[in-house]
Image: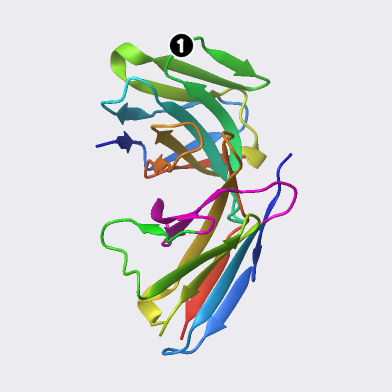
């Protein structure tokens, strides 16, 4: 089946620094990728939709200048959390859509901001 | 707007008991897709089933079964003869288009005790 990877799986950073998370579709081309955030013991909330070669579409309430998304190729999307603060600590999950097919989820990245 | 409600926050059962996880959805779309995912402690989402709005047939896969009823906007999930390995958070989700962004329910924590 389709495989999506995320890197890193865990990251700890200091407040005020930026962190980049990569999402890769390993065996298929993903025209669209999605970024979700999950706070502890809560559900997944869509942050943004990333389309290859165009600007991401952010959900209401998500700061586009804080969460920079780049989808430079059909197999890679990156999420950069800029000037991270403790309240950004969360589990970030990406998913990739290939053509008309369903979404395939990555294993997630646990971000802790100290 | 789309909405998914999982009213059961947490369920505890003893091994070998049957358990049903409820899911009620809201959407104005005539074509939509319903999903169930399992999230074990590792955090990675495991796809369980997808059902489109035109297919109301119930489905059985091993110990798992799903009951889709459009009349009550419900898509319930039953685990028969539960096992400790079934312990996880289970999410019901809805999308307007196949492979499009997902709206997740709050999730139900299932604890199966031996």
Report the span colored magenta.
A25-53
Chain letter of disc 1? Answer: B
- Quadrant where the N terminus of chain A sits is top right
Picture coordinates of residue A40, whole percent (x, y): 43, 62
Q: Is residue A67 left or right of residue B41?
A: left
A39 and A1: which one is in front? A1
Label 1: how many Cα within 10 Å (few below 14, some 14–19, many 20+): some
Picture coordinates of residue A111, whole percent (x, y): 52, 73
State the residue at coordinates (70%, 46%): A28
State the residue at coordinates (45%, 28%): B34
A114 and A105: which one is in front? A105
B96 and A13: which one is in front? B96
Picture coordinates of residue B60, whole percent (x, y): 61, 16
Q: Is residue A15 above or below residue B111?
A: below
Please tell me whether residue A46 belongs to the stretch shown in magenta: yes
Labels in figure, total: 1
Tell me if residue A42 can be seen.
no
In which quarter of the view is residue A41 placed? Answer: bottom left
Q: Is residue A104 above or below residue A111?
A: above
B110 and A12: which one is in front? A12
Q: Residue furthest front?
A: A53
Q: Is residue A66 left or right of residue B16?
A: left
Q: Is residue A77 left or right of residue A45?
A: right
Tell me if residue A114 can be seen.
yes
State the residue at coordinates (58%, 77%): A11
**Disc 1: which residue:** B56
Picture coordinates of residue B101, whole percent (x, y): 43, 43
Secondary structure of residue under mark 1: loop
State the residue at coordinates (38%, 22%): B31
In which quarter of the view is residue B96 placed? Answer: top left
């Amino acid at each position: 089946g389709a495989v999506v990877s995320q890197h890193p799986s865990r990251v700890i950073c200091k407040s005020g620094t930026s962190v980049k998370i990569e999402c890769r579709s390993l065996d298929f081309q993903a025209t669209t990728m999605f970024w979700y955030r999950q706070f502890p013991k809560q559900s997944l909330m869509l942050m943004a939709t990333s389309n290859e070669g165009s600007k991401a579409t952010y959900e209401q309430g998500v700061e586009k200048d804080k969460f920079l998304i780049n989808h430079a190729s059909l197999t890679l999307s990156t999420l950069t959390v800029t000037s991270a603060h403790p309240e950004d600590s969360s589990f970030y999950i990406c998913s990739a859509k290939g053509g008309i097919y369903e979404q395939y989820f990555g294993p997630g990245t646990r971000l802790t901001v100290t | 707007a789309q909405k998914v409600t999982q009213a059961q926050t947490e369920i505890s059962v003893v091994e070998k008991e049957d358990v049903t996880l409820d899911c009620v959805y809201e959407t104005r779309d005539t074509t939509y897709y319903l999903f169930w995912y399992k999230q074990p402690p590792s955090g990675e989402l495991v796809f369980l089933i997808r059902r489109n709005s035109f297919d109301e047939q119930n489905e059985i896969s091993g110990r798992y079964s799903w009951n889709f009823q459009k009349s009550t906007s419900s898509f319930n999930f039953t685990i028969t003869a539960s096992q400790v390995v079934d312990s996880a958070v289970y999410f019901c989700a809805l999308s307007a288009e196949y492979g499009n962004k997902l709206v997740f329910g709050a999730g139900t924590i299932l604890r199966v005790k031996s």
